[in-house]
Amino acid sequence: MTQELEELVSLFRKGDTRALAKLITMCEESEDKARRIIDMLDVDTQRRAHIVGFAGAPGIGKSTLINRVIEEYRRRDLGVGVLAVDPTSPYTGGAVLGDRSRMNRHSVDPKVYIRSMGTRGQLGGLSRATRDAIRLLRAYGKDVIIVETTGTGQNEVDVARVSHTVVVVMMPNLGDTVQFIEAGPVEVADVFALNKADLVGADATMAELRSMVQLRFASNSWVPPIVKTIGTTGEGVKELVEWIEKHYKYLVETGELRQRERRAYLYEVVDLTKHRLSTLVDSEIGSDSHALEKIDFLDGSANPYKASDNFVKHLIERISGHTQQKL
Amino acid sequence: MSQALDKPKQETRKIRVLVAKPGLDGHDRGVKVLARALSDAGMEVVYTGLHQTPSQIVGAAIQEDVDVIAISILSGAHMAIVPEVLRLLRENNAGDIAVLVGGIIPDEEAEELKKMGVYEVKGPGTPLSELVEIVKRAASARH
Ligand SMILES: Nc1nc2c(ncn2[C@@H]2O[C@H](COP(=O)(O)OP(=O)(O)OP(=O)(O)O)[C@@H](O)[C@H]2O)c(=O)[nH]1
Ligand SMILES: [Mg+2]
């Protein structure tokens, strides 16, 4: 395993796409492997990349739009990485990852790398390995890293925690636009794309969005622009990319870039810790029902709060090394 | 630190499959049904869309690090497309990715494709459950 890893890392350093792809797979497979890869690469200190998150309701046109955004960045001769995250079924563990079908024409461009990922049991819009994949893409030398997540609400917040710039994609007549906006955490938006601008009602939705932005972002030093786009034809995409780049410049000039990165890093530590603790709980219980029974034996009073207190105490002893004994 | 946090969980190797439909034939209902069946069996299925060229298929397969490529061709272009996919895989050091082909393919051509390195060839009437088993087998032969 270690030798295989060393070989992969050395190929990765030479720019080998397969090695990049395999390293991402290993990060997805286990936290343990991810840790070893990140140790070996020491990647955070190296290169810079602009991380751009795309969020928005299912079917709103994110992947189609990203396909055009890639095109625009390639015109500027920038290298692009895309991580397209789709939900994993909690029942089967499987996933149909369909985002790529909107952008697969870029598969033959050596300066574009697209990777589809399932959320794999992680709540929200990203998988645990998404951040490792971002690091790998940055170390690989990508200038721009695009992260697509589907759905609104918590997923938007999740993607905001890993991105420098968040593009929230909207479309005309999405039910009652205002209500929709009220429901979603639009505060995370740095740029709005009003996609499907070819559909009727685009102007009315634009007006609604404008007044919402005036209301909600009035006191901010960066007021998110609203850009009309048509993903299917590419109209408006040049302007969208210009705004995304302007936002990056704004972050650099105001020093907010560092703050955002710091915050992203701290959230990662929090998430990783939560993930490890929850894994620990699962591994203590194991898969057989006998072990599950033991949790209650800790107390026996059939009071779930007390039993849980005891379980937590037991876990703390395990972590601190006071006991090697499982339940 | 203690053992407890160091060794979290045994590793999960998930089968990843690329489902591709090259050539000019029109609709993708069949491959979407296959994609659903494979995902119901716990796999991650990357769907690449219609009209993909061999180099797009191979590029996608490498970037996605899939174990298996399932190609559906009904247009009769299999003898042009499949050998090219195999050649590009080898050229890119990815000859270990298993290739399955589905379509209306005469027996002698199916044999020829298998000799070239295709893992399995199946006709349009093949039950989904059988296809799922073949993909599983092809993936485990790889690891
Ligand atoms: N009319 C019109 N249709 C569009 C536009 N952009 C995308 N579409 C269509 O919208 C549908 C969904 O597009 P996707 O790009 O898959 O949407 P998505 O937001 O990525 O979807 P999920 O990943 O499933 O959340 C497709 O049929 C696209 O062709 C647009 O600007 N105008
Ligand atoms: Mg999409």
Image (cartoon, rainbow, N blue to C red):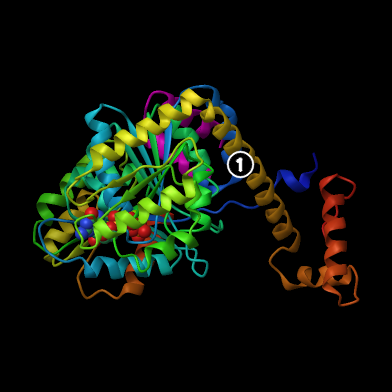
Check the image and report above or below for A36 versus B83: above
Quarter holding the N terminus of chain A? top right
Instruction: Please say whether residue A140 is visible from this viewpoint.
Output: no
Task: Using the rendered view, name the quadrant where residue A49 is placed.
Answer: top left
Q: Is residue A251 left or right of residue A308?
A: left
Q: Determine whether, in the image, residue B9 is placed left or right of residue A108.
A: right
Residue shown at 47%/33% (left/top)?
A: A136
Give the image location of residue B67, x and y in percent.
38, 51
Q: Position of residue A212 (x, y in %)?
A: 42, 54
Our reading of the magenta stretch's main secondary structure is helix
- Which one is nearer the viewer's eye here, A145 or A258? A258
| Residue at point 30%, 68% (across, down) | B34
Quarter of the image where ligand 1 sits: bottom left
Q: Nearer the viewer, residue B118 or A169?
A: A169
Position of the C terminus of chain A, as image quadrant, is: bottom right
On whether ligand 2 comes within 8 Å of the CB at mark 1, the answer is no
- Residue A115, above or below A284: above
Q: Is residue B69 above or below residue B34?
A: above
Question: Is residue A2 in the magenta section?
Answer: yes
Magenta region, residue range: A1-27
Q: Looking at the picture, which amino acid does disc 1 mark?
A: Glu
Tell me, yes or no, whether the highlighted magenta stretch contains residue A59. Answer: no
Is residue A303 at all visible to an observer of this figure? Answer: yes
Q: Position of residue B112 (x, y in %)?
A: 15, 55
**Disc 1 designates what residue?**
A268
Label 1 environment density (alpha carbons within 10 Å; few <14, some 14–19, many ≥20): some
Please give left or right for residue A74 compared with residue A126 in the image: left
Q: Chain of mark 1?
A: A
Say which quarter of the image contains residue B72: bottom left
Percent from the top left, x then y, of residue A199? 21, 61
Q: What residue is at 26 percent from the left and 45 percent from the top?
A: A67
Q: Is residue B21 left or right of residue A135?
A: left
